[in-house]
Image (tube, rainbow, N blue to C red):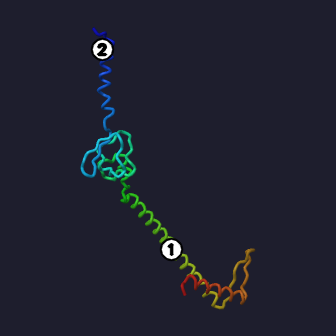
Amino acid sequence: MVSLPSKAARIALLALACTLPMIASAQWIWVEKDGRKVFSDRAPTPDVPAERILKSPRGAALPAAAAPVAGTPADTGAEKTAAIPKPAGKDKALEDRKKQIAAEAADKKKAEEANVIALRNENCSRARTAKVSYETGARVSRVNAQGEREYLSDDERAAELKRLQQVIQRDCGQ
């Protein structure tokens, strides 16, 4: 009779003999141009398109020219995400925020322009009033740096009238 250890050794040897053909079996399967299936342990030639490769071993890279085309069944999930471009659509919230910022900037600019117009109108009004008082011919006085009142000479009056006329032309649009 056969002893127990040798019987276990025979079963292990038989199992190894049965799995050996599976290890050596074809790992690549592809379809040739003429429609014939090819089983091989070597990668197909680079002229075989990726969509014709039916099976490849785990972790094996496809031949260089047989890189998968986007949308083919041979694509893996990682390759699909890399091949798919990001959507070109617009983010509605971002677009709305940009419009809101642009509207706020336009409103601020309009407010500043309105402020400048109001200041010019005020300057124009004051310059016209001052010009009328200088043109009357009455003596005009002003307060100097020491707080004393002094009267303007004819030359000073003419220079002040000239300055007021420039302010009127600039601010009143005349």
Determine which of the numbered discs, if any, sits on residue 32 in the image: none
Residue 68 x %, y %: 35, 50
Residue 53 x %, y %: 30, 47
Q: In the picture, which quadrant includes the C terminus?
A: bottom right
Q: Viewer-proximal residue, 38 or 100?
A: 38
Q: Secondary structure at mark 2?
A: helix
Q: Viewer-proximal residue, 168 or 100?
A: 100
Q: Residues within 10 Å of mark 1 (few under 14, many from 20)?
A: few
Amino acid type, label 1: Glu
Furthest residue toward left: 35
In the image, is 134 to the left or to the right of 25? right
Figure label count = 2
Q: Residue at x 27, y 52 (%)?
A: 33
Determine which of the numbered discs, if any, sits on residue 113 in the image: 1
Q: Secondary structure at mark 1?
A: helix
Which mark is first along the chain, 2 or 1? Answer: 2
In the image, is 12 to the left or to the right of 115? left
Closer to viewer: mark 1 or mark 2: 2
Furthest residue toward top: 1
Choose top left, top right, bottom left or bottom right for residue 153. bottom right
Q: What is the spatial separation of the Cα atoms under label 1 and label 2, in whole angstroms?
A: 103 Å
Amino acid type, label 2: Lys
Q: Residue at x 62, y 85 (%)?
A: 166
Q: Residues within 10 Å of mark 2 (few under 14, many from 20)?
A: few
Residue picked out by circle 2: 7
In the image, is 140 to the left or to the right of 84? right
Q: In the picture, which quadrant includes the N terminus?
A: top left
Q: Viewer-proximal residue, 51 or 31?
A: 31
Q: Residue at x 33, y 53 (%)?
A: 70
Residue 19 x %, y %: 31, 28
Q: Above or below — where is 172 with respect to 24? A: below
Q: Above or below — where is 86 with respect to 166? A: above
